[in-house]
Amino acid sequence: MDLSLSQPSSPRVSEPREDEHVVKAAKSLRRHIGHEETSNEDTPSRQWSPGAIFWVESAPPSSGGAKCRLPCPEKIMPGEYRIAVIPGQHSYYGRDSTDYYHISCFETIADFSQLAFVDRVQPVTRDTWQVRNLKATSILDGNFLMDAGAERLLLEWKKTVISLIGHRDARAGTPETLEPDSFDDLLANAGSSKFVPRAIADLSDFDYDIFRTTLAPFESDGPDDNDEWNLFEQYLAVRDGQEGALDYRHSLSETLNAWKRDIRRTFCHQGNAEDGDGIAELGPKAIRAVTRLAVTPRPDIQGAFGRGR
Ligand SMILES: [Zn+2]
């Protein structure tokens, strides 16, 4: 088990910052992604990056932690979820910087009620680490990669926020909704006793198995279970159709902090540490679910070397 997972990540409540600084940093981020017209007196010091991605990742081991790009007294500690903006807003000796942020700090400057911001959010996982420009040696022991629960929560948060934006912006009627297909069914219902596995074109056996088991959002006690545990119901701080949800800036950090808190409770409890407070609230089914979803799925290295797929 990765012990860094069980270290307390200080729950970061949004603290009032210097308004002026936040306004400036938010404007600078908007310009960086090409989302704001500039006036004549605005002379960009460097090229903008309309293709910048907001990676969400697990901070790797480091002695002192990473510095948050906002004037923030706390370092981003190993095992915490963080944002890495790539390319960042500066370059050093011709190389683009990577800008790191606490997620709750980033939420004060990124306007996630706009598609231009939400669309850029991506989890660092077994499928995306190469695009994030990481070396295989950096990620094979699970560093940087999000655990299964955080990956599912992040993508569900993104899908929900995009849907809320769609409804807000579809002033003349409801936005087009697509019929859920077998893959949507797998994403939404795996783990439930009611889930019926169906073949999915273009999905490797490796990926199918991971989605059906490790990444499954449901935990069930079997066909008679009328109260199956669901990851999204437990932790997602935003709901489709929820009034005013887009005005709340901290739904992503709140979701991931709540998830991390229960990982910590579960593993501290299993290690008999005193820190297992609140474990009684979880119950055996939730503990089973959290233990399963706290795993970090690794890349299909064998598949990459030619095992039949
Ligand atoms: Zn910060």
Image (spheres, rainbow, N blue to C red):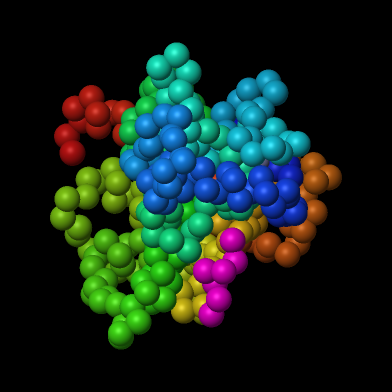
Q: Is residue 220 left or right of residue 10?
A: left
Residue 199 position by quadrant: bottom left
Q: Position of residue 55 (x, y in %)?
A: 45, 41
**In the image, farthest residue toward the top:** 93
* Of residues 205 and 123, the one drawn nearer to the viewer in this rendering: 123
How many marks overall?
0
Which x, y percent locates residue 269? 74, 48
Where is residue 46, by image quadrant?
Answer: top left
In the image, farthest residue toward the bottom: 173
**Residue shown at 19%/27% (left/top)?**
306
> Could you tell me which residue is drawn at 28 percent across and 43 percent down?
206
Tell me if residue 18 can be seen.
yes
Residue 279 belongs to the span the image colors magenta: no
Q: Residue at x 30, y 85 (%)?
A: 172
- The answer to which quarter of the image holds residue 180 is bottom left
Q: Position of residue 270 (x, y in %)?
A: 70, 45
Residue 79 seen anywhere in this rendered image of the structure: no
**Going by the picture, which residue comes out furthest to the right?**
274
User: Residue shown at 55%/76% (left/top)?
Assistant: 244
Q: x, y percentage for residue 205?
A: 24, 46
Quadrant, the N terminus: top right
In the picture shown, does residue 89 fall above or below 162?
A: above
- Quadrant of the displayed image that contains ligand 1: top right
Q: Quadrant of the C terminus?
A: top left
Q: Which of these two is toward me, 275 or 62?
A: 62
Query: Which contiguous range is marked in magenta?
Result: 243-249
Horizontal side, residue 224 vs residue 82: left or right? left
Q: Relative to the observer, which residue lies in front, 100 or 238?
A: 100
